[in-house]
Amino acid sequence: MRVEIVDRVIDAAEIVAAMKAGSDGAVCVFDGIVRDNTRGRRTLHLDYEAYREMALEQMRGLAAEAVTKFGVRDVAVVHRLGRLVVGETSVLIVVASAHRGAAFEACRWLIDTLKKTVPIWKKEQFVDGAIWADGEPFPESVGLRRREESGRPTDDAHISESRYGAPGVGGEWKG
């Protein structure tokens, strides 16, 4: 397993190549990149912060759980901190497995669970201001769409649901 929090550019090609083995029939990759907008607001950059020690510990636990739960051969989870510009990779999940179904399921579970549980926060800097993705709601004038019956946003909101909250929001850890 490869689990890292880095302060440099993530070399996705190198990590994917290192994960492949002769017994694999599939390598599934989630490459989370900084997009140029959120809900119509033009993004300048993102700033990622983390409670590094706790985040690494939880990421290692998720990687091990994915191997056991989905029966995959190997997992890489790499998250970048610091300032990222449009097009840069913020998080890379790579799952190697004998079968594609297990690789897809493990990869999806890993990114979804990481975003909900690991203490990593994202501050979005727009041309017209900044918000912590998990801590400050978008102003109503920014065009929030109503939620579906499932409770999920109807657009690709990309809002973290971390149980720890964003730094500086509330002044204490949630959990």
Image (tube, rainbow, N blue to C red):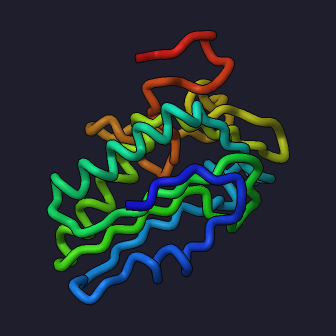
Figure quadrant of residue 72: bottom left
Figure quadrant of residue 138: top right
Residue 171 versus residue 127 in the image, above or below: above
- In percent of width and height, residue 52 lies at 58, 36
User: How many callouts does the rendering have?
Assistant: 0
Q: Residue at x 49, y 37 (%)?
A: 55
Q: Seen from this angle, which residue lies furthest bottom?
A: 22
Q: Residue at x 44, y 60 (%)?
A: 2
Q: Nearer the viewer, residue 3 or 166?
A: 3
Q: Is residue 43 left or right of residue 149?
A: right
Residue 157 versus residue 92 in the image, above or below: above
- In percent of width and height, residue 78 lies at 52, 57
Quarter of the image where the N terminus is located? bottom left
Q: Residue at x 28, y 50 (%)?
A: 64
Q: Seen from this angle, which residue lies furthest right?
A: 127
- In percent of width and height, residue 136 lies at 62, 25
Q: Is residue 4 left or right of residue 117?
A: right
Q: Nearer the viewer, residue 73 or 39?
A: 73
Q: Seen from this angle, which residue lies furthest top?
A: 171
- In percent of width and height, residue 114 lies at 41, 44
Q: Residue at x 73, y 63 (%)?
A: 86
Q: Nearer the viewer, residue 145 or 82?
A: 82
Q: Is residue 69 left or right of residue 173?
A: left
Quarter of the image where the C terminus is located? top left
Residue 15 versus residue 158 in the image, above or below: below
